[in-house]
Amino acid sequence: MFAEVIVDVVNKEVDKIFDYIVPQNLNVIAGTMVLLPFGNRTVEGFVLSLKESSLVPKEKQKSIISVISEKQLITTEMLQLAKYMKNVYHLKMVDILRLMLPSQIRLGKVKDLTIKNIKINNDFNFVNNYLNTLKANAKKQKEIIEFFINNDKISIKKSDLAESFSKSAIETLIKENVLIQENVKQNREPLKNIESNYKSVVLNEYQQNAVNKILEKPKTYLLHGVTGSGKTEVYMNVINNVLKQNKNVIMLVPEIGLTPQVMRQFKARFGNLVALIHSGLSDGEKFDEWFKILNKESRIVVGARSAIFSPIENLGAIIIDEEHDNSYISDSNPRYSTHEVAEFRKNYNICPLILGSATPNIDSYFKAKNNEYELLELPKRANNKELPKIQIVDMCKEFRGGNTTPFSEDLMEKLNQTIANNNQCILFINRRGFSSFVMCQNCGYIPKCTSCDVSLSVHKDEHQLKCHYCGKKFKLLTKCPMCGSEHLKYGGVGTQQVVNLLKEKFPNVSIFRMDNDTTKTKDSHAKILSDFEKSKPAILVGTQMIAKGHDFPYVTLVGILDADLSLFMNDYRSTEKTFQLITQVAGRAGRSDKTGEVVLQTYFPKHYVYNLVANYDYIRFYEKEINLRQTTLFPPFSKIVRLLITSEKEDDAKNATHNLFLNLKELRMHFKEDVYFLEAMKSPIGRIKNKYRFQIVLRFANNNDIINEIFNLVDRNQSKSVTIFVETNPLSLS
């Protein structure tokens, strides 16, 4: 018997199947991990399948050394998914398999957590005889024995028992075999002490109709509901029905910051059936949660993007909440679309896939309009309240009137009123740090990262300049290193600067900041949100991680400090992203019985996107956007592919780009009118982490033959010193 194995080594030259002999004394099945000889070293490997014979010459055949785990760690479904992803995304198989098996398990660094538990000997006569023979001064031993008898012979953690009783008496009773000490596996629980106070909710007619439709057929459904329309209750009712069918569920959310609120709701409703998967867990928590899923102890998986690879089987529904969010696209290796992976799992399990959003992707809504998805609408808020009114403020007029702060007069007036009413406010600015750059006013010098071609961001509280691409840190400048001038100007307001200004204006108000800098530590998301929720009055300042999903009943005001930040990005989706961001963050206001209002600050108040967003008119926005894309042949009427060529040597990257571009020009000649655009260039950010970056961008008809030919050309142009990544409809071209 032979096993087809992928070795756990990231190298494109060994990313292929190797045959190994399966020794008769080993129990090897597809999906297990094994230890095997590879060259002159011993490595781990993933078993893909078994077969009776091999074409490898007998003198070159090698045997598997041992099995790391006899359990099937990668399920049959996930092995099929791996083959699909390799074909569609042109990825290395080892990179895909690593997505499906967390490093905590793969590398064996984490083990089960065991604790010492104490219980009383089951032999009642033995215990009773011992109790009767105890001397009068052995009061402490007697107390311990009576404790166990009175508590129905429970098992208790040894450390807990030692807090109430004498340690020496406990040890004596263990030695005399009256108490039994045993090692018990204990799960490391993420998000401990979640308050669970589920209240039954009666669905309105739109919600009930959505639930009924979803349960009818195993299709892909686009649940388009305004913010606060009760999409989560729809999900929960679907899940409840799926569980009754003895099937399981995956529920995805876009941000780690959303998981505490979602977990609170789900734990309240479904208790210990829920497992949590995301990158913010400790290694031990990931290990335990993953095995709870594999061992069928959990039936609902809640998590961010990576949860789509959890080993849960017999799926009855897959839910992607806030489906429009960019975080569902992996823009680093391995690159993939969560929607497409979910679609594969939906087809494999023959179950419904639910995509929920107040502002769906243009591509998703297009598919719904063309009957590829079924469209379900939730047009009203669940509490029947009106959506918060959005007031557009012209910041050019503010500036001309002498206001140079990030806050308009209207926003400050409403903020003062919100605080006076003991309510809460959310202020949104999609830029973290103190400011986006520092510049010498004398000579124009702007400090840049030594490893990346980007300017450094100012983090004033930490007295540092930081690179937001590679993470390098530098001392904050006090004078220009080029000319010595002390006249330094900070450009672009960030969350940190906004918080500092607010503290000056409102010294007695609780002000919280939520961005990538304040949420690095474990449970920091949950703590910030919990502290904000408990504080009144209070202000929460944050980036896009505060823009979706959060439900705070006392938030009556939302301020959008610079709505234009995403509007003029070099991206064909810039207006779509702007519409989505503003709608989502506006939806955080007025979610209970209190009326909400929104102040939207912009330097371009007459731009059509602001008029449409102020009226929450997604339909008109979609119609305008889809007509524009059809006219210009942008997705969904075409595909955009970026080939990102990187190397530590600039000449190597440049030469590889040149050769690949020549190959692609020939390809363009072959497919003629189907290739609309082809251009090679240096990447806008020409160097990241000391790797030089060039790119080739193509736009072409939705033709699988073209993408397959591109993959072939990429393979031919790869080398040891050059890496080429293929991105389809990339999130960014920078």
Image (spheres, rainbow, N blue to C red):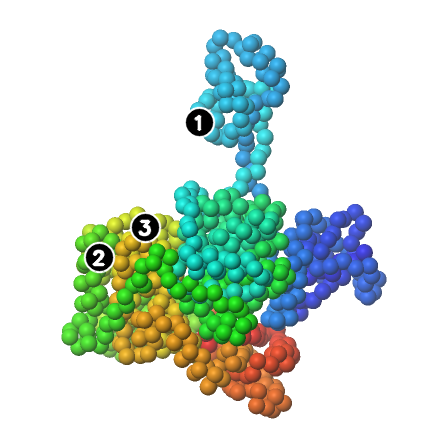
Can residue 494 be seen here?
no
Coordinates of residue 450 in the picture (x, y in percent): 41, 71
Query: Residue 696: which numbered mark, if any?
Result: none
> Do the numbered discs 3 and 1 sit on residues whose CB atoms are within 8 Å?
no
Q: Residue at x 52, y 65 (%)?
A: 221
Q: Position of residue 399 (x, y in %)?
A: 19, 75
Seen from the viewer's position, the closer of residues 354 and 136 is: 354
Mark 3, secondary structure of its residue: helix
- Circle 2 sits on which residue? 418
Q: Residue at x 26, y 72 (%)?
A: 392
Q: Residue at x 76, y 58 (%)?
A: 50
Q: Is there CB contact under 8 Å for labels 3 and 2?
A: no
Judging depth in this view, the residue of 643 and 120 nearest the camera is 120
* Residue type, label 1: Glu
628 up-or-down from 123: above or below: below
Disc with the residue nearer the chain's start (3 vs 2): 2
The residue indicated by pointer 1 is 163
In the displayed structure, does residue 197 sit left or right of residue 601?
right
Helix, strand or loop at mark 1: helix
Q: Which residue is mark 3?
A: 533
Residue 48 on image: x %, y %? 70, 59
Q: Nearer the viewer, mark 1 or mark 2?
A: 2
